[in-house]
Amino acid sequence: MKNFTFVLIFLGICIFFSSCAPTYLTHLTPQQKHHTFTENGIEYTHLQQDSIEVIVGYYATEGEYLIMDVEVGNMTEDSVTFDPAVCSYMLIDSLSGNIMEFQKDGVSRPLISTAYNPEKELASIEQRIRQQEANLKAKRTFLTILAVAVTVATVAAVVNNNNSKSRDTKSPRLRAVNTNIALNLWSDSMRLIGTSAVDAHAQYSFKTDNLESLKETWQNMPLQKFVIPPKKRIRGDVIFHPEKVNGILKFIFPVANHNFEALFRQSVTKTP
């Protein structure tokens, strides 16, 4: 039921971009036991209101992505809209039952995290790709100007070395040595400029290839905003930013006029 190819690509990209970050082991366990079942090793919570079903399971946490496997079933006679961008969760202290808070600008705010918006993520990736193209163009322009400047300077030096005044004051052998030094310096400079151009293009290709893979993944794996026809179902991933603390995560999935609430206990362990 899940496209594991895209999941593996997505997780691989997440690992690449978070390779320097501290490592955490995260596990989420459903708390609404009377609504829970297991499929392919994943524990799901099944929720239903007025012929609309929402099934939620924890898939993985990698880097800055908490991935929930979500299925929405519309058993009504009307179409309903599901938008992952309005889904969220709040972190609840498992002992007090209160919503956890964080300090920002000296003000306590409830710890609520909204799901990633796939459309905004795609727009951001497109912007980053365009920025990489602009950076490559700027580097190429700079290296071209540098190559022209070095060439002009070398020609000027050679011409000056062989003009009539130099012929009067310098021996032919000295003029030849000076010309050879200038040409060797020009050759070395061109080689360095060429190497810099190749490196710039290699970095551009590496970064844009990763961004294109990430773009393809956001296009195909996460659920997008979708109008679900009557008697139809959709399934995919809703992705959140993880909060790496222990507690109860109260997920809220708005569908039609209902808020479907799924409770998961989060256990986080920081590895060496």
Image: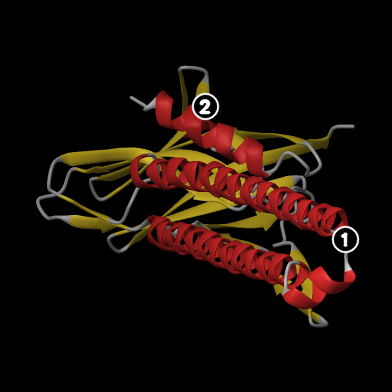
Q: Quadrant of the N terminus?
A: top left
User: What is the quadrant of residue 60 in the picture?
Assistant: top right
Q: Could one spot residue 213 in this view of the protein?
A: yes
| Residue found at x 77% / y 45% | 246
Secondary structure at badge 2 equals strand
- State the separation of the CA atoms marked 1 and 2: 89 Å
User: In this view of the protein, which residue sits in the foreground, 102 or 21?
Assistant: 21
Residue drawn where x is 72% and y is 65% of the image? 158
Question: Residue 181 shows which numbered tag?
Answer: none
Residue that numbered label 2 is attached to: 43
Residue 127 in the image: above or below residue 3 = below
Residue marked by disc 1: 171
Crowd class of label 2 (few under 14; some 14 to 19; many from 20; radius 10 Å): some
| Camera-nearest residue between 83 and 39 | 83
User: In the rendered image, which quarter contains the C terminus?
Assistant: top right
Q: Residue placed at 84% from the left, 73% from the top?
A: 168
Examine the rendering and report whether any part of residue 59 can be seen. no
Image x and y of residue 151, in percent: 64, 64
The answer to which image quadrant residue 165 occupies is bottom right
For this view, does 91 lie left or right of residue 41?
Answer: right
Above-or-below relation of 59 to 266: above
State whether residue 81 is above or below residue 107: above
| Element under disc 1 | loop
Amino acid beneath label 1: Ser
In the rendered image, residue 219, in percent from the top left (x then y), is placed at 35, 46
| Residue shown at 17% from the left, 40% from the top | 232
Answer left or right for 272 relative to 205: right
Viewer-side label of 1, 2: 1
- Looking at the rendered structure, the kind of residue marked 2 is Glu
Query: Furthest residue to the left?
Result: 77
Q: Residues within 10 Å of mark 1 (few under 14, many from 20)?
A: few
On the image, the x and y values in percent for residue 53 come to 31, 42
